């Protein structure tokens, strides 16, 4: 009985001594995905402090060395390199290991389309850039297939699937020949993002003014202002009417409304009327006298 | 003895009261004697105007009975939210141009202190003798009255819809309008360096524009920076061109090696109305011998424009902008009612001006 007692005490002492000498270690899994809870086994003995330092999170907790450490899904939401540190309590000894958290599957598209307004008939005028990110907005570095699609009132065109490189894929498009909106979308599996680009008429072409006398006034009016492809120049574009007569020069900057620009000026004898919009000059007309 | 002291005290009090009354009357501009000269008559009238004492001012006129009170007040105090309603008469300079025994012609330069700085207004007034007095004969004026009418206006307005305040990265936002500085010229004036030129909105939406210039010295160091402040039309509609002018006081052009221009642009909500025509533009010489660009503004919309601001770009025979001048019109622009304007032009610049272009900014109460 006495011998058994001595053996138990000796064994317990040996166990305690062996634990006391066991070095600290952390064994993170090789593949960790952002937002998925993970267990990191540890070795060692006694009370210890565990630190987790990541791109978007820092944590500290007291643990029993040798136990497995549970890392919650929210603690590793940001992809990147994390540092795990295990320190023995009341001692200077610390162990430090790094592990990488990979982004999860692509769940969102950041879709940048530029410009938001473009003149018709411009080659490579529209750029569309899609960036694939996971549900935590981590850049999805693994290749994914994205399809670009441009839709106007008249037609729709799709690109073949394009593989992302380092999470990014882009394309360039010509602007169409007709004004109006073009909807550009990027699709990744079931996810789709769309942007709208306004295609607007180019510079006016064949600006033409006509005049009609009304009492002591003359009414000046352009024909519908269009670009050289027949697209209506946007309303609000300024057309400058100029009247030159014996009293001097009179000018009115009138905006195009419903496709035409119109103004009224006092008529006080022979005058020359001209019209211009931006760098485009229209016809001249002579009123009330010989040409 | 007792009565003599009381009498002396009463007399002394009466004398002091009389002196006090005379002094206070003088201080408040009450004429206790005849207005001995045409100049005095105009000065006294202007004093009443400065005090905004319209009843008294009108009573000082030779033709008080024929002058409509409301027209007289409208003429001097303004109305319809015009710049004149935000002005006070600071000083007046009177000079007599011509005088006979019974009448005279006086020129008065009225210096108004306004919300946008000093504005001068020169008038020639007829002054007539009335017994021992001289009195100003006020030119007949009327409160502008428009015939009742309905004006149909096709309003055109741009609004901007943003996705939200979060400013989430990667969401589509509205591109800033494409605005280009099409010319720049730096000139030296006796007391300053002036950078001027023109800016055009090449986009299809309105743009808010502010032009800045930074001066760089011979060592490549940026040493001064100024903005165009109100010497530019800030809201530019598509294809619209505005002159700009940036003043650098107390500077010589020799100190400047380079000018770095920068146009700050933003998309803003705007309206295409009102349209203001600039009619009968001409270069002329005013009563004081100064060169100016003059003409009439016609508001072609149905709403009153409270304050109009005229910007003029002058070009030489090579089409280069050699001067930009501006001026505020202190009368409101009523619909379809011509309103004269004039902007100063330095005499040395006027001789080189071959062509000019005048644009109008407007401020209407209750709108942007």
Image: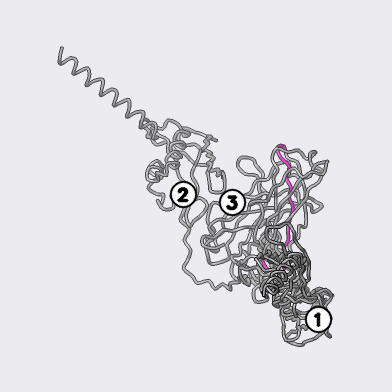
Question: How far, Cα to Cα, is label 1 from label 3?
Answer: 62 Å
Per the rendering, the mark at residue B328 is 3
Mark 2 surroundings within 10 Å by alpha-carbon count, few (fewer than 14), some (14 through 19), many (20 or more): many
The quadrant of the image that shows the N terminus of chain A is bottom right
Q: Quadrant of residue B53?
A: top left
Question: How far, Cα to Cα, is label 3 from label 2?
Answer: 16 Å
The quadrant of the image that shows the C terminus of chain A is bottom right
Question: How far, Cα to Cα, is label 1 from label 2?
Answer: 73 Å
* Residue A159 versus residue B50 in the image, above or below: below
Image depth: mark 1 or mark 2 in front: 1
Task: Tell me if residue A117 can be seen.
Answer: no
On the picture, is A34 further left or further right than B296?
right
Which structural element holds mark 3? Answer: strand
Image depth: mark 1 or mark 3 in front: 1
On the picture, is B223 further left or further right than B35?
right
Residue A185 at x, y = what percent? 74, 81
Q: Kindly identify which residue carries mark 2.
A: B77
Highlighted magenta segment, given as a residue range: B190-206
Q: Quadrant of residue A59?
A: bottom right
* Residue B117 versus residue A227 in the image, above or below: above
Does the segment drawn in magenta span residue B231?
no
Does the segment drawn in magenta span residue B192?
yes
**Nearest the eye: B244 or B318:** B244
Which structural element holds mark 1? Answer: loop
**Nearest the eye: A5 or A192:** A5
Mark 3 surroundings within 10 Å by alpha-carbon count, few (fewer than 14), some (14 through 19), many (20 or more): many
Per the rendering, the mark at residue A144 is 1
Task: Tell me if residue B33 can be seen.
Answer: yes
């Amino acid at each position: 009985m006495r011998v058994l007692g001595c053996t138990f005490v000796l064994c317990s002492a040996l166990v305690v001594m062996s634990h006391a000498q066991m070095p600290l270690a952390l064994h993170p899994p090789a593949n960790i995905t952002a937002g998925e809870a993970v267990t990191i086994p540890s070795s060692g003995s006694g009370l210890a402090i565990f630190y987790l330092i990541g791109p978007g999170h820092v944590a500290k907790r007291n643990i029993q060395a040798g136990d497995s450490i549970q890392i919650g899904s929210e603690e590793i939401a940001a992809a990147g390199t994390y540092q795990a540190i295990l320190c023995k309590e009341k001692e200077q000894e610390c162990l430090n290991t790094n592990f990488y958290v990979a982004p999860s599957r692509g769940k969102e598209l950041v879709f940048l389309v530029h410009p938001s307004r473009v003149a018709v008939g411009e080659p490579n005028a529209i750029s569309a850039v899609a960036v694939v990110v996971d549900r935590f907005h981590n850049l999805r570095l693994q290749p994914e297939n994205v399809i670009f699609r441009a839709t106007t009132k008249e037609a729709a065109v799709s690109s073949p699937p394009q593989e992302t490189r380092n999470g990014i894929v882009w394309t360039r498009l010509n602007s169409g020949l007709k004004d109006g909106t073009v909807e550009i979308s990027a699709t990744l599996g079931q996810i789709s993002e769309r942007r709208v680009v306004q295609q607007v008429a180019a510079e006016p072409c064949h600006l033409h003014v006509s005049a009609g006398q009304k009492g002591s006034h003359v009414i000046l009016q352009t024909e519908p202002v269009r670009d050289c492809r027949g697209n209506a120049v946007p309303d609000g574009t300024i057309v400058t009417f100029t009247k030159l007569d014996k009293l001097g020069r009179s000018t009115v900057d009138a905006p195009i409304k419903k496709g035409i620009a119109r103004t009224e000026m006092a008529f006080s004898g022979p005058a020359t009327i001209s019209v211009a919009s931006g760098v485009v000059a229209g016809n001249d007309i002579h009123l009330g006298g010989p040409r | 003895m007792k009565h003599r002291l009381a009498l002396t005290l009463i007399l002394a009090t009466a004398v002091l009261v009389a002196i006090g009354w005379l002094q206070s009357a003088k201080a408040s501009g009450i004429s206790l004697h005849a207005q001995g000269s045409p100049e005095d008559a105009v000065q006294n009238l202007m004093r009443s105007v400065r005090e905004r004492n319209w009843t008294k001012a009108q009573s000082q006129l030779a033709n008080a009975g024929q002058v409509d009170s409301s027209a007289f007040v409208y003429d001097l105090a303004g109305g319809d939210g015009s710049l004149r309603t935000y002005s006070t008469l600071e000083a007046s300079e009177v000079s007599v141009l011509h005088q006979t025994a019974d009448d005279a012609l006086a020129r008065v330069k009225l210096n108004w202190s306004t919300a946008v700085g000093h504005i001068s207004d020169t008038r020639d007034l007829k002054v007539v003798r009335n017994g021992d007095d001289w009195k100003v004969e006020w030119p007949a004026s009327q409160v502008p009255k428009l015939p009742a009418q309905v004006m149909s206006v096709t309003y055109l307005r741009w609004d901007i819809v943003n996705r939200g305040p979060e400013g989430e990265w990667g969401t589509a936002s509205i591109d800033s309008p494409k605005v280009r500085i099409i010319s720049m010229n730096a000139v030296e004036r006796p007391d300053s360096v002036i950078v001027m030129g023109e800016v055009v909105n090449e986009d299809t939406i309105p743009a808010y524009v502010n032009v800045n210039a930074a001066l760089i010295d011979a060592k490549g160091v940026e040493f001064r920076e100024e903005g165009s402040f109100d010497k530019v039309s800030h809201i530019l509609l598509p294809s619209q061109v505005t002159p700009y002018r940036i003043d650098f006081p107390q500077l010589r052009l020799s100190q400047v090696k380079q000018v770095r221009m920068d146009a700050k642009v933003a998309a803003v909500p705007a309206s295409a109305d009102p349209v203001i025509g600039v009619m009968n533009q001409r270069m002329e010489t005013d009563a004081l011998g100064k060169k100016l660009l003059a003409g009439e503004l016609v508001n072609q919309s149905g709403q009153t424009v409270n304050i109009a601001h005229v910007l003029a770009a002058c070009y030489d025979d090579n089409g280069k902008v050699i001067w930009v001048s501006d001026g505020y019109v202190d009368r409101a622009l009523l619909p379809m009612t011509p309103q004269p304007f004039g902007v100063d032009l330095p005499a040395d610049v006027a001789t080189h001006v071959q062509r000019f272009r005048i644009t109008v900014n407007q401020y209407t109460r209750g709108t942007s």
